[in-house]
Image (spheres, coloured by chain):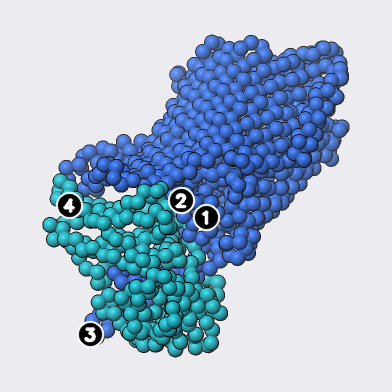
């Protein structure tokens, strides 16, 4: 009896084990969703005033992506009046589709005026949508932080890593975005892209961003350090959190932070930052 | 105001100890297992002429009082043991220590059943459940690893965090709202392998009791449950051993007398061995180019206990637990190590002052920590969190007469926390950064309670607990009343009700739905108020017939000062972690029904829970609106059946059905272009209200059978089990997959995302296992 039971038990178990697929597609019905206006407007000294105003869609909706024009028509929110005030200046961003071919970015509101290196003025954004509803926000441009040095080190296999040093001001609460692009800034997914603040320095003034030994001879490293403000830090953290915890059984997603106000339910960021960049060749 | 309250409390205690010093004779003693010398908790002792009875306390001690009787009949019974009856002249105080013999034909002994259920009918205790290692061993287990905590998850009102997880949620409480004590020392993280196994080795465990409500006054510090785990004391009659070899771990327990009948020891260890295999594979492939090392993981735990009888009136116990999980990964670039675990120590002294007064004084130490360190060439990183407790407590049991059983005591705990200590920097010291908080706190408790019998039918248990927590210059003080009542309609039916206020001064910083080793504890501070709950419960117990007991309860729990975390909270290496906290309220209510049968060839239980839990009023979460936590399961049904076919074969089956967990899915999506130097993320999820989507219901059937063999040296068994026998694909989590579409633009084909598809992932298919166990 014992042997028969054991054999039956194991044959059944093995058949069951191999016949199972632990992953499958499912359809679920989510609560009704009202589309939101999405704004990205980055003020970076030396670059034009420009903004991308789009709209969101239900999570499982299928978009009409038969060609690029239709995609843009589906996504973009046009016909709004957009202006940015600072000091006694007012910059009007016109509703024109523009393509930054170098960086492969699209904007549907822009001006030819360049963002000044003005780190003291408050910049005020006002958007009046086609239906008369408003989006407003305020920001300042964070001054740049200098890259003190970039040190390249090699391991025994002659793979290289880069250590990027900056000096933090211990008297201010500072936020940084660190990006490391390999060989190209254009359409390149950064090898590193993360946020940091100076809380962990505990009074020290030197901050270092390192990498693994992952680079080889003739690589070009673009080390970028962005000094950003808290609103942008919170927005970007929440976007990264929403993306990384989507489907993570151990994680907790969150509502995306926005610094937009006004009379419509808008989401996004209006912020100013400065970038310092160092280009390093691996020899 | 506080001084007045303390004064009143002390006056009440004084009254207890003076008012009842009226003359009656008493019967007291201890009850032990004749074969092993283990004290037996919850043994029923009845003096028929007094028409009253009691149970041995958690230390095996009992005391009863009544009028002088000649030739009184005393009946002592405990499930699984032959009942013992004796005639005694109770004309003066008597000491009666009893050794009960295990009954090999126990399961058919009806009288034991009647007594066992009768105690449940007569006791004021409600909202409790218990599990013995014997029960846990009979129930089919995941990968054959017998787990007493997972057995508890099969009881009504207790649910798991997610499939296979040993986290526990009781009556709508969070997982940090359970007080888990091992020989009275707190265990802060009761799980191995990211929650898939509990830290309790069932070979070393004597008894587990869970309070879900109606908390006795001696317990405090958590809102939702007390899980009281007692270790075996060790066989003081003869040297013996048990052990087993399973698929993922092996274990060995040795026990025996140090001095026969006077002192004993027990040592029990368990270790997994997957790492031994992976290390072998890594060694065999170490010279292969592009070979990726398999990370090494193992866990182990060790339980020890010794006890000494220092005379008729004194007994000393010392026990300890040490367990670690270790994960390591090394390659050319870095050397990563992650380990975590608990250590506890208990020294306990039982003293019998006289026939009516018994005391227990305990010193405990608890330590839970995790440590992650990584070394790269020239740099190192070290992240650590820890909680250490040193505790002293003393409990006094006093039975002045047959109507009163009084218990009073105090406890004092010093908590020491290391919260997110990060140290990182270069080896040459030029770069250095870190974080870390090191708060401390003192938690104090003073309590008294009385189990008072008005008459045969009506019994009340009322008590008070004064608790306090001191952190720097902030002191919290709370008055925690407790009350329970039982009214017997007849010998088979009793009605019960209870109320308990509980206060929790330390909190878990975790926003995941499962038990993770990196969860850290944090004290109440100036800005973090203690969590508070009020729970009322009412129900009845009904002996349906010999062998069956029906229990049915309703409860409602109010939760105040609940802690959650703001969206996108930074909980690691954050010296301002309190800024990430959100404070709100909650409530839960429900009903639990359990039909159990603990005698005969077929034993087991059917449990059903209907429950609802909500959290809300958090200003930073959903604008203060109420929401359901992930584990708000409306229905839970468990059926556990164990059948003893004959002396060689035992069969068992477990069926579990539960409403699906809630999950937080994105409801919208947008294109996030980001700044120069980055790529566009076309599908960025946007979340709305928390936990609005309920997963499909969960159900599973496990089966197991045990074949026992007798040998000259002892006995052994082969335990076969199959988890999820009909291979149900229960949802563990959802993830999204983006489908891309090619479009032509300017003669170039580019890929764009067209839609999002939802995929469900299941964790466990049917999993067969086999374990060999032995005993000598």
Instruction: Determine crowd level at label 1: few under 14, some 14-19, many 20+ residues with C-alpha closer than 10 A.
Output: some
Instruction: Please tell me whether mark 4 or mark 3 is closer to you in this view.
Output: 4
In this rendering, the answer to whether A281 lies above or below B109 is: below
Instruction: Please tell me whether mark 1 or mark 4 is closer to you in this view.
Output: 1
Q: Is residue B695 visible?
A: no
Residue carrying label 3: B747
Q: What's the CA distance linking mark 1 and mark 3?
A: 51 Å
Residue carrying label 1: B580
Marks 3 and 4: in contact by CB < 8 Å? Answer: no
Residue carrying label 4: A159
Q: Are marks 4 and 3 on the same chain?
A: no
Q: Quadrant of residue B119?
A: top right
Instruction: Determine crowd level at label 2: few under 14, some 14-19, many 20+ residues with C-alpha closer than 10 A.
Output: many
Badge 3 element: loop
Q: Quadrant of residue A9?
A: top left
Badge 4 element: loop
Residue at 67% x, 47% y: name it.
Answer: B532
The chain coloured blue carries which letter? Answer: B
Using the image, tell me which numbered label, if any, was put on residue B574: 2
Q: What's the CA distance linking mark 1 and mark 4?
A: 40 Å
């Amino acid at each position: 009896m014992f042997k028969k039971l054991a054999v039956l038990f194991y044959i059944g178990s093995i058949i069951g084990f191999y016949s199972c697929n632990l992953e499958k597609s499912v359809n679920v019905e989510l609560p009704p969703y009202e589309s939101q206006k999405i704004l990205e407007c980055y003020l970076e000294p030396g670059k034009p005033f420009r903004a991308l105003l789009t709209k969101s869609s239900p999570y499982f909706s299928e978009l009409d992506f038969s060609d690029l024009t239709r995609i843009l028509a589906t996504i973009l929110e046009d016909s709004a009046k957009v202006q940015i005030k600072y000091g006694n200046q007012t910059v009007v961003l016109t509703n024109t589709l523009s393509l930054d071919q170098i960086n492969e970015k699209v904007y549907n509101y822009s001006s030819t005026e360049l963002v000044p290196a003005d780190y003291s003025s408050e910049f005020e954004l006002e958007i009046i949508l086609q239906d008369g509803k408003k989006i407003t926000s305020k920001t300042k441009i964070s001054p740049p932080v200098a890259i003190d040095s970039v040190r390249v080190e090699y391991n025994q296999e002659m793979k290289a890593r880069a250590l990027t040093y900056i000096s933090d001001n211990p008297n201010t609460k500072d936020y940084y975005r660190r990006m490391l692009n390999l060989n190209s800034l254009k359409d390149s997914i950064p090898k590193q892209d993360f946020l940091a603040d100076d809380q962990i320095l505990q009074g020290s003034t030197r901050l270092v961003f390192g990498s693994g030994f992952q680079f080889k001879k003739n690589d070009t490293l673009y080390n970028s350090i962005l000094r950003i403000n808290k609103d942008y830090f919170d927005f970007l953290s929440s976007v990264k959190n929403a993306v990384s915890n989507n489907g993570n059984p151990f994680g907790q997603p969150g509502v995306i932070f926005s610094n937009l106000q006004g009379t419509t339910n808008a989401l996004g960021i209006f912020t100013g930052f400065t970038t310092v960049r160092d280009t390093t060749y691996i020899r | 105001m506080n001084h007045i309250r303390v004064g009143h409390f002390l006056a009440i205690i004084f009254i207890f100890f003076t008012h009842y010093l009226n003359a009656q004779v008493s019967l007291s003693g201890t009850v032990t297992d004749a074969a092993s010398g283990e004290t037996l908790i919850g043994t029923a002792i009845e003096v028929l002429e007094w028409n009253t009875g009691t149970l041995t306390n958690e230390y095996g001690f009992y005391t009863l009082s009544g009028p002088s009787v000649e030739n009184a009949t005393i009946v002592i019974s405990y499930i699984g043991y032959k009942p013992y009856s004796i005639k005694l002249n109770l004309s003066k105080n008597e000491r009666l220590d009893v050794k009960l013999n295990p009954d090999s034909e126990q399961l058919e002994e009806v009288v034991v059943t009647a007594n066992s259920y009768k105690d449940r009918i007569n006791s004021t205790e409600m909202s409790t459940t218990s599990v013995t290692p014997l029960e846990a061993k009979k129930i089919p287990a995941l990968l054959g690893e017998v787990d007493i905590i997972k057995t508890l998850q099969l009881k009504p009102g207790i649910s798991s965090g997610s499939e296979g997880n040993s986290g526990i949620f009781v009556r709508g409480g969070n997982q940090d709202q359970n007080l888990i004590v091992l020989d009275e020392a707190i265990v802060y993280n009761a799980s191995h392998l990211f929650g898939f196994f509990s830290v309790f080795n069932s070979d070393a465990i004597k008894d587990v009791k869970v309070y879900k409500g109606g908390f006795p006054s001696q317990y405090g510090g958590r809102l939702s449950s007390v899980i009281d785990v007692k270790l075996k004391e060790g066989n003081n009659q003869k040297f013996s051993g048990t052990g087993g070899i399973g698929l993922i771990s092996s274990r060995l327990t040795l026990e025996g007398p140090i001095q026969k009948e006077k002192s004993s020891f027990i040592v029990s260890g368990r270790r997994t061995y997957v790492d031994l295999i992976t290390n072998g594979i890594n060694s065999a492939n170490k010279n292969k180019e592009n070979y990726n090392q398999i990370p090494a993981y193992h866990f182990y735990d060790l339980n020890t206990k010794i006890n000494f009888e220092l005379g008729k009136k004194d007994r000393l116990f010392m026990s300890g637990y040490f367990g670690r999980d270790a994960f390591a990964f090394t390659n050319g670039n870095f050397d990563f190590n992650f380990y975590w675990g608990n250590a506890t120590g208990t020294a306990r002294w039982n003293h019998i002052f006289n026939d009516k007064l018994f005391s227990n004084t305990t010193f405990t130490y608890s330590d839970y920590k995790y440590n992650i360190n990584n070394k790269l060439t020239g740099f190192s990183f070290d992240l650590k969190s820890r909680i250490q407790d040193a505790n002293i407590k003393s409990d006094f049991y006093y039975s002045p007469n047959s109507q009163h059983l009084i218990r009073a005591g105090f406890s004092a705990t010093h908590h020491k926390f290391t919260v997110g200590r990060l140290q990182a920097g270069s080896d040459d010291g030029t770069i250095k950064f870190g974080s870390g908080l090191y708060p401390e706190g003192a938690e104090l408790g003073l309590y008294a309670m009385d189990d008072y019998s008005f008459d045969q039918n009506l019994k009340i248990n009322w008590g008070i607990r004064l608790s306090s927590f001191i952190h720097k210059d902030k002191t919290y003080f709370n008055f925690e009343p407790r009350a329970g009542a039982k009214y017997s309609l007849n010998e088979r039916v009793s009605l019960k009700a209870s109320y308990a206020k509980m206060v929790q001064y330390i909190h878990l910083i975790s926003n995941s739905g499962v038990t993770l080793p990196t969860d850290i504890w944090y004290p109440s501070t100036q800005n973090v108020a203690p969590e508070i709950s009020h729970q009322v419960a009412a129900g009845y117990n009904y002996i349906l017939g010999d062998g069956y007991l029906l229990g049915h309860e309703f409860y409602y729990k109010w939760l105040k000062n609940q802690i959650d975390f703001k969206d996108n909270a930074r909980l690691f290496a954050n010296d301002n972690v309190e800024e990430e906290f959100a404070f709100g309220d909650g409530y839960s209510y429900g009903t639990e029904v359990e039909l159990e049968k603990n005698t005969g060839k077929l034993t087991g239980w059917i449990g059903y829970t209907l429950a609802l839990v909500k959290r809300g009023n958090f200003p930073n979460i959903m604008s203060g609106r109420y929401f359901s936590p992930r584990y708000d399961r409306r229905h839970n049904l468990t059926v556990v059946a164990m059948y003893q076919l004959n002396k060689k074969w035992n069969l068992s089956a477990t069926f579990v059905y539960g409403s699906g967990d809630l999950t937080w899915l994105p409801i919208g999506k947008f294109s996030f272009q980001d700044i120069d130097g980055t790529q566009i993320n076309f599908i960025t999820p946007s979340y709305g209200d928390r936990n609005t989507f309920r997963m499909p219901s969960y159900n599973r059937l496990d089966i197991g059978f045990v074949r026992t063999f007798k040998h000259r040296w002892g006995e052994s068994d082969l335990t076969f089990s199959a988890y999820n026998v009909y291979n149900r694909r229960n949802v563990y989590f959802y993830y999204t997959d983006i489908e891309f579409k090619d479009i032509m633009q300017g003669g170039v084909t580019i890929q764009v995302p067209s839609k999002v598809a939802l995929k469900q992932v299941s964790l466990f298919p049917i999993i067969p296992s086999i374990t060999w166990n032995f005993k000598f």
